Image: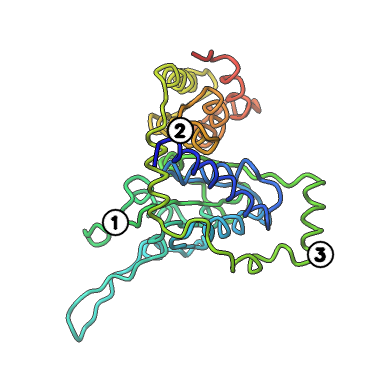
Amino acid sequence: MTENQNIDNIHQFHEDLKKRLHQCIIGYDDLMDLLTIAFLSDGALLMEGVPGTAKTTLCKFFAQNIGGKFGRLQGAVDILPMDVIGVQKYHQDKNTFTFTEGPIFANLFLVDEINRMTPKAQGALLEALAERQVTLDNQTKHLPSPFLVIATQNPYEMEGTFNLIESQKDRFTLSYRIEHLNVEDEVSVLKKGRTSGLDLGTYQQQKPLVEDPAAILAMQETVRSIYASDDILSYIGDLVEATRRHPDIKLGVSTRGSLALLRSAMANAAIHGRDYVIPDDVKYLVPFVFAHRIILKRESSLNKISVDSIIKQILETVPVK
């Protein structure tokens, strides 16, 4: 199969996937794109939104359509690291230990309401997000491949939540803030709900679009071959540097963040049927890559300066190469 055919297959896969997702999800086109981009770039996605905005339903239906194994963990204050990773069980009669895998051993692992977990439990994800492996009792366990972590969180001002630590947030390739639907989409949801059209079970009899995880690995390999010119790399570098020297920013985007922007832009090019990155790929993804990585200075926050406004300013002032 030629490289162009591989790109065409990725583009068609994405279009078919969005059609499937729209069967029971109204709106959220950008989020559907970001889910595919995160998966094809071997990344991770952090979603923030108030309860009842279809975050979990979308993730479940996405997992169903890409095949492979699905794991899910509901965040709570009493979750322990072993609830994420798994546990070694001792068998007294045989004087041996066996390892029981936790839900993270999946092709798609959904952590629902991650910021209801304590920082210690959140930290159990660090190694998995960075190295695609976990360590328990000095033993390293490799996670399945492909592997995608999707975490949802409630806004920080809600009761019973714990802020994600900075090193944890930086390991998420992309972030997305889910807003309430507009009136038109809200009415469409009500119409579907009136006829039980929002029941996920209605669609679970459909065959996955991709039944073999190896097909996803092949798509990821194709994405890694997408061409990004030196001018694109310089443009990304300038955008990242602008966050580091901005007077209102305490902590700018890391090198991990610049790599996340590049890889996400390559995946975005592929889902749109191109084998090369253009500046618009980068511009589109900057808010989703930068927003959760930027930390404002205290005085900037007190002056009601927002991360979103700074990102917009950077995109307007940094010239395209």
The residue most toward the front is 1
Nearest to N terminus: mark 3 or mark 1: 1
Find residue 142 and name its label.
Answer: 1
**Which quadrant would residue 315 be assigned to in this image?**
top right
> Could you tell me which secondary element the residue under label 1 belongs to?
strand
Mark 3 or mark 2, which has the lower sequence index?
Answer: 3
In the image, taking residue 251 as reference, residue 205 lies left or right, namely right
Q: CA distance from mark 3 to mark 1?
A: 45 Å
Q: Amino acid at mark 3?
A: Arg
Mark 2 belongs to which amino acid? Met
Q: Using the image as rendered, state which of residue 190 and residue 76 is in the foreground.
A: 190
* Kind of element beneath mark 2: helix
- 74 is higher (above) or lower (below) than 13: below
The foreground one among 186 and 4 is 4
Q: Nearer the viewer, residue 38 or 118?
A: 38
Query: Which of labels 3 and 2 is toward the front?
Result: 2
Mark number, residue 194? 3
Q: How many C-alpha atoms fall within 10 Å of the one at disc 2: few (<14), some, or many (≥20)?
A: many
Helix, strand or loop at mark 3: helix
Q: Residue 291, image x and y in percent?
A: 54, 34
Residue 53 locus on image (x, y percent): 67, 53
Q: Nearer the viewer, mark 1 or mark 2?
A: 2
Q: Residues within 10 Å of mark 1 (few under 14, many from 20)?
A: few
**194 relative to 64 in the view: left or right:** right
Residue located 43% across and 16% down the image: 231
Q: Residues within 10 Å of mark 3 (few under 14, many from 20)?
A: few
Tags 1 and 2 in contact by the CB under 8 Å rule? Answer: no
Horizontal placement of 314 versus 25: left or right?
left
At label 1, which amino acid type do we have? Answer: His
Is the N terminus in the top left, top right, bottom left or bottom right quadrant?
Answer: top left
Disc 2 target residue: 266
